[in-house]
Amino acid sequence: MYRDLGFTALLTIASHFFFIAAAFRMLRAVRFDQFLRPNHVNESRFLLLFIAIALGFGVSEFFLSLLEAARNLIYLVQ
């Protein structure tokens, strides 16, 4: 039982980090500095980071929810 909880926690942390990193990497192609006032480079970087965290977390939660639903399908047959 505790081993399953530990595996789930590890999977959740790894999934969040993976999807946040992937979202950050993809969002670097967008030029956020065009949407902000000139000479606000730090604000542009923080905006990129926060959007990447929000997007990556949302995608990760969707992925984990889909895995959990697929795992629970076995109870439909029993």
Image: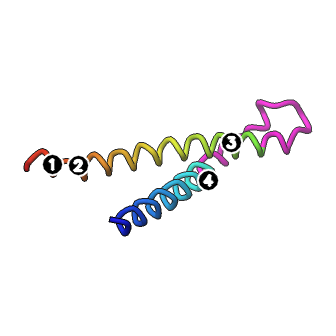
Tell me the residue that label 1 is attached to.
Answer: 75
Within 10 Å of disc 2 (Cα), the crowding (few <14, some 14-19, many 20+) is few
Whether residue 32 appears in magenta in the rendering, the answer is: yes
Quadrant of the image occupied by residue 69: top left
Q: Residue at x 39, y 50 (%)?
A: 64
Whether residue 68 appears in magenta in the rendering, the answer is: no
Q: Earlier in the sequence, mark 3 or mark 1?
A: 3
Q: Residue at x 45, y 45 (%)?
A: 61
Looking at the picture, the colour scheme in use is: rainbow
In the depicted view, which residue is nearer to us: 15 or 43? Answer: 15
Quadrant of the image occupied by residue 4: bottom left
Query: Seen in the image, is 57 located left or right of residue 31?
Result: left
Residue type pointed to by label 1:
Tyr
Tell me the residue that label 2 is attached to.
Answer: 72
What separation in Å lies between label 4 and label 3 (alpha carbons)? Answer: 13 Å
Q: Secondary structure at mark 1?
A: helix
Q: Earlier in the sequence, mark 2 or mark 4?
A: 4
Q: Which residues are magenta?
A: 25-44
Residue type pointed to by label 4:
Arg
Query: Seen in the image, is 55 located left or right of residue 3?
Result: right
Q: Residue at x 67, y 48 (%)?
A: 28
What separation in Å lies between label 3 and label 2 (alpha carbons)? Answer: 33 Å
Within 10 Å of disc 4 (Cα), the crowding (few <14, some 14-19, many 20+) is few
Which-is-in-front pick, marks 3 and 2? 2
Residue type pointed to by label 2:
Asn
Residue that lies at the very extreme toward the left in this rendered image: 78
Q: Which mark is residue 50?
A: 3
Within 10 Å of disc 3 (Cα), the crowding (few <14, some 14-19, many 20+) is some
Establish if 21 lies above or below 36. Answer: below
What separation in Å lies between label 2 and label 4 (alpha carbons)? Answer: 33 Å
**Viewport quadrant of the N terminus:** bottom left
Q: Residue at x 68, y 42 (%)?
A: 50
